Image (cartoon, helix red, strand yellow):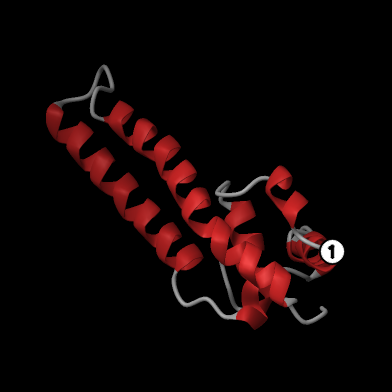
Amino acid sequence: MKPVTKFDWKHFNASLGLWRERYLERVNHEIGGLLTTPGQTPTERFWATHDRVRAEKRILHECFDGFSKARMPEYLALMHRYGIITDEDFAGFSDAPQADLRYWTAAPEASGAGPQSAGRTP
């Protein structure tokens, strides 16, 4: 992996808020749907919602806490894996981060590459 450029680091930081809000817009809608799931008791709906919020909290912590410039490609791959960012979101980056994303999102089982082999499990 090549070092992250100043341009890519600035683009990454400038995009974080948009990516987070877009993701949470979708997740909040899905969580709201859990509260009205037919065929479940209010207690079941509450606990299903609670569990989903806890899972999303873990994802948000994993993807948005503790950034470092050196680990930016890994964070991009995690965000991509969780659906926080899409392939189209990479259009603003230079070629190097896009190549890093292909590395990090390669099937870990097939290549041994990716965040899971680096001690990170999404």
The total number of labels drawn is 1
- The image quadrant that residue 61 belongs to is bottom left
Q: Residue at x 36, y 31 (%)?
A: 29
- Residue 77 on image: x %, y %: 66, 61
Q: Residue at x 44, y 36 (%)?
A: 26
- Residue 51 on image: x %, y %: 29, 48
Q: Is residue 59 left or right of residue 38?
A: right
Inspect this view and state whether residue 86 appears.
Answer: yes
Q: Is residue 77 left or right of residue 54?
A: right
37 to 76, vertically: above or below: above
- State the residue in front, 5 or 64: 5
Q: Residue at x 58, y 57 (%)?
A: 79
Element carrying mark 1:
helix
Inspect this view and state whether residue 73 appears.
Answer: no
| Residue on which the image places disc 1 | 99
Q: Residues within 10 Å of mark 1 (few under 14, many from 20)?
A: few
- Residue 46 on image: x %, y %: 18, 37
Q: Residue at x 56, y 67 (%)?
A: 121
- Residue 87 on image: x %, y %: 73, 46
Mark 1 residue type: Ala
Quadrant in which the C terminus is drawn: bottom right
- State the residue in front, 88 or 53: 88
76 to 48, vertically: above or below: below
